[in-house]
Amino acid sequence: MTVRALAQTLAVSMLNLRSLGQRLGSSSVAVAGFAGVVTVFVAVLSIAEGFRRVMERGVAPDTVLVLRAGSETEMSSGLEAEQTRIVKDAPGVRRGAEGPLASAELFVIVNVPKRATGTDANVPLRGVEPAAFAVRQDLQIVEGRRFAEGRNEVIVGRAAAREFAGLELGNRLKWGEGEWEVVGVFAADDSVYESEVWTDARVLQPAYRRGASFQSVYAKLESPDAFGRFKDALTADPRLEVAVLREDEYYAEQSKVMRQLVQTLGNTIALLMAVGATFGALNTMYSAVAGRAREIATLRALGFQGGPVVVSVMAESLFLALVGGLLGGGIAWLVADGYHTATMNFQTFSQVAFELAVTPRLLAGGITYALAMGFFGGIFPAIRAVRAPIASGLRQL
């Protein structure tokens, strides 16, 4: 672009932007359309982002999960007591003063009503061994105390206590063939474990007629590099048929279905709304071009090239889109970010409590989405502006 063309472009673009106040009504409609699309787009995708965060927090590459071979989740797994002892004694498992840092665990679902709606929800009830607290080193009791071994006592995750009714300290709950007393509330770095209820695995087994069986073993390794040695030892043992996974990889996989569902839904809704917003922008820009027909014709008659006129129309459309994108992103951040909710993890059919998360990446994506709408909403009116005969425009003088 020559210096003359650049100067013309800047002059015409600034003239357009300064005259936006004269077209405040139609311009506001376009901005509102862009903002609405971005608000919905960012707010819906913040569900997937929040779900991903909670599934990936509080997990570590030096913690491993052992399931029965072919099992994708703990719900579908099963391990005999002797098999869990073999896992605990495998090479690479970190050891403490009381033995291997490994916990054989049960995972069952109990019905607990949601505070917001009163409808029953599937909440995970996890039976653990004492070493579980050393394996999940971020877990801390924030109210009450730990459950006593051999007693029908439970501790509840902080997020579960917030989202579900009846999990307050001192409450007694009837699950399975036992009655359980809530004696503590724990935090676990805002991870998925905070959506669970924990108790002694040896007490949970008879309450759900599980005999001496378990469903998984969580173990802390000597280091992340010990994973290969640990996995090779277990998969080569003829007494076992197991799948060995890193804890962080397992929970990242657990969030995949939910994230894909929400992202597909969010993109579909945003796309449908974007069509309407783009047509709104087209109408706005066509009206702007029609209202400025004399001005554009005069500029062309004075020697202004077509390129600067096209750029000036596009600059106006993109400016409106940028304002709408920023407004929509701000609304989504104010409304959605940090909002507490709970939803179904479709791979375990249990509830996960989490916070919606409006991240800079989502905001940037929303603004980019708005600019794309602004581009398509401005390109055709811009072309029409330079193709209109100069004589027709001058007749309106």
Image: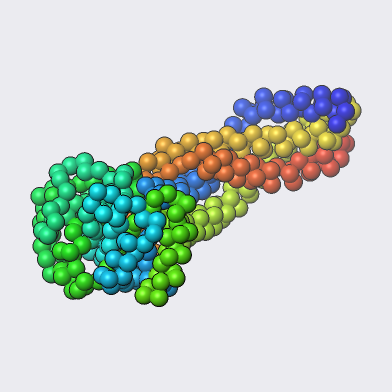
Of 372 and 378, nearer the camera is: 372
Measured as percent of width and height from the top left, residue 298 is found at 83, 29
Measured as percent of width and height from the top left, residue 291 is found at 71, 35
Q: Residue 212 falls in which quadrant of the image? A: bottom left
Q: Residue 307 falls in which quadrant of the image? A: top right
Measured as percent of width and height from the top left, residue 14 is found at 71, 25
Side of 29 where 201 appears, left or right:
left
Of 373 and 239, nearer the camera is: 239
Q: Looking at the image, which residue is at 60% across and 53% down?
A: 275
**Colour pattern:** rainbow
Q: Looking at the image, which residue is at 30% across and 66% down?
A: 84
Side of 329 where 373 appears, left or right:
right
Side of 5 where 41 appears, left or right:
left
In the rendered image, the quadrant that contains the N terminus is top right
Q: Visible in this render: residue 166?
A: no
Q: Is residue 235 above or below residue 2?
A: below
Q: Looking at the image, which residue is at 28% across and 46% down?
A: 139
Q: Visible in this render: residue 380?
A: yes
